[in-house]
Image: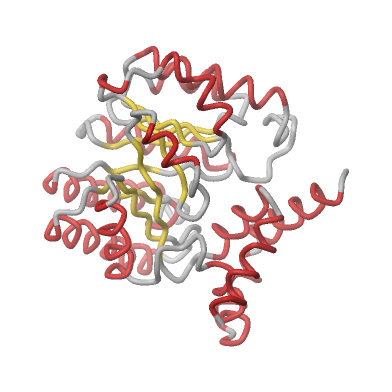
């Protein structure tokens, strides 16, 4: 294992350490230092800050996904309170005329406390986003939660046609899950997958197998005409997929994360493809930022340089 691979694995391990995440959040000194790194990838800590960033991106011709971070909430009362923040986000976004979707982890709103609680809170948000004319996108989490997420999505699809879901090209099971999802309404967001997973159930990161899997699933999605989001920063992959992309179809978009698609996203827009930038916000940014750095540990050095320049 190379030094870079060891660094990436260490960051993914840190990302899953809930005790460390809580310690950083509670310690003013650690929180300030970590936030200097996180700012590059996070659109703010409040609904207002996130919507302000969304307005700037909308003005550049980009659609936006807004995600209030806070995965793995294990308190029922807190999960319901956090659902209220998502509802406020939907209301404020509609009032400002923001071109955005609302994205979330189901574990943030109670699914790991009780799946029925998670479904009830997700249903409230689905009702609100439907009334506001916004897409609602469910994120994918670790493989131990895949069945729970797909179950909740299936229940929501019985009532709503605007609720999308994310699927991981890394997981071997996606070969069976994707055809079933194509039978449901709602956008399908295809990502490679950043979670630390055993190779018995997932393709290795940065492997030829993962690249081939992503190309195969993206091609299937694009050729199907189903609403989809091709979410990757790999311009080489996107170039290979271009023969399957028909900008006038209205069925797909190219999606990248805030702070990562600085060059690639404008390139895809210049090629005529619809684009979307994914903005996360809130105080619970630890896992998200660790996973972003794990994908390319050199980003930690860049983020530190950025922080030093802002200091």
Residue 148 falls left or right of residue 131: right
The x and y percentages for residue 86 are: 28, 59
Residue 19 falls left or right of residue 123: right
Among the 4 quarters of the image, the one containing residue 246:
top left
Identity of the residue drawn at 47% across and 16% down:
219
Identity of the residue drawn at 61% across and 87% down:
29
Q: Is residue 287 above or below residue 244?
A: below
Identity of the residue drawn at 32% across and 69% down:
49
Residue 59 falls left or right of residue 241: left
Residue in the foreground of this view, choosing between 94 and 234: 234
Residue in the foreground of this view, choosing between 16 and 279: 279
Residue in the foreground of this view, choosing between 82 and 216: 216
Q: Is residue 154 above or below residue 209?
A: below
Q: How many marks?
A: 0
Among the 4 quarters of the image, the one containing residue 170:
top right
The x and y percentages for residue 183 are: 33, 18
Q: In this view, does 260 lie above or below 72?
A: above
The x and y percentages for residue 222 are: 40, 18
Quarter holding the C terminus? bottom right
């Amino acid at each position: 294992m190379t030094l870079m691979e060891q660094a990436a694995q260490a960051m993914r391990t840190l990302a899953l350490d809930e005790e460390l995440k809580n310690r950083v959040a509670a310690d003013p000194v650690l929180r300030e230092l970590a936030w200097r790194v996180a700012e590059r990838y996070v659109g703010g800590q409040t609904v207002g800050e996130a919507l302000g960033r969304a307005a700037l991106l909308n003005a550049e011709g980009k659609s936006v996904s807004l995600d209030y971070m806070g995965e793995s909430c294990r308190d029922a009362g807190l999960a319901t309170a956090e659902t209220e923040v998502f509802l406020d986000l939907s209301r404020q976004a509609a009032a400002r005329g923001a071109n955005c979707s609302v994205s979330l982890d189901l574990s943030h709103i109670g699914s790991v406390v009780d799946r029925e609680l998670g479904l009830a809170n997700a249903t409230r948000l689905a009702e609100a986003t439907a009334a506001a004319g916004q897409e609602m996108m469910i994120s994918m989490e670790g493989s131990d939660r895949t069945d729970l997420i797909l179950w909740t999505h299936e229940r929501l699809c019985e009532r709503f046609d605007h609720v999308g879901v994310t699927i991981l090209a890394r997981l071997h099971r996606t070969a069976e899950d994707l055809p079933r999802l194509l039978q449901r309404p709602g956008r399908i967001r295809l990502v490679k997958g950043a979670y630390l997973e055993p190779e018995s159930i997932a393709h290795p990161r940065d492997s030829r197998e993962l690249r081939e899997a992503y190309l195969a699933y993206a091609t299937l999605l694009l050729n199907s005409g189903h609403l989809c989001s091709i979410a990757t920063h790999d311009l080489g992959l996107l170039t290979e997929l271009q023969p399957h992309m028909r900008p006038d179809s209205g069925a797909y978009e190219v999606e990248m994360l805030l702070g990562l698609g600085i060059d690639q996203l404008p390139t895809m827009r210049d090629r005529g493809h619809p684009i979307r930038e994914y903005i996360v916000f809130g105080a619970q940014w630890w896992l998200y930022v660790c996973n972003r750095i794990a994908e390319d540990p050199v980003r930690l050095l860049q983020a530190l340089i950025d922080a030093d320049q802002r200091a």
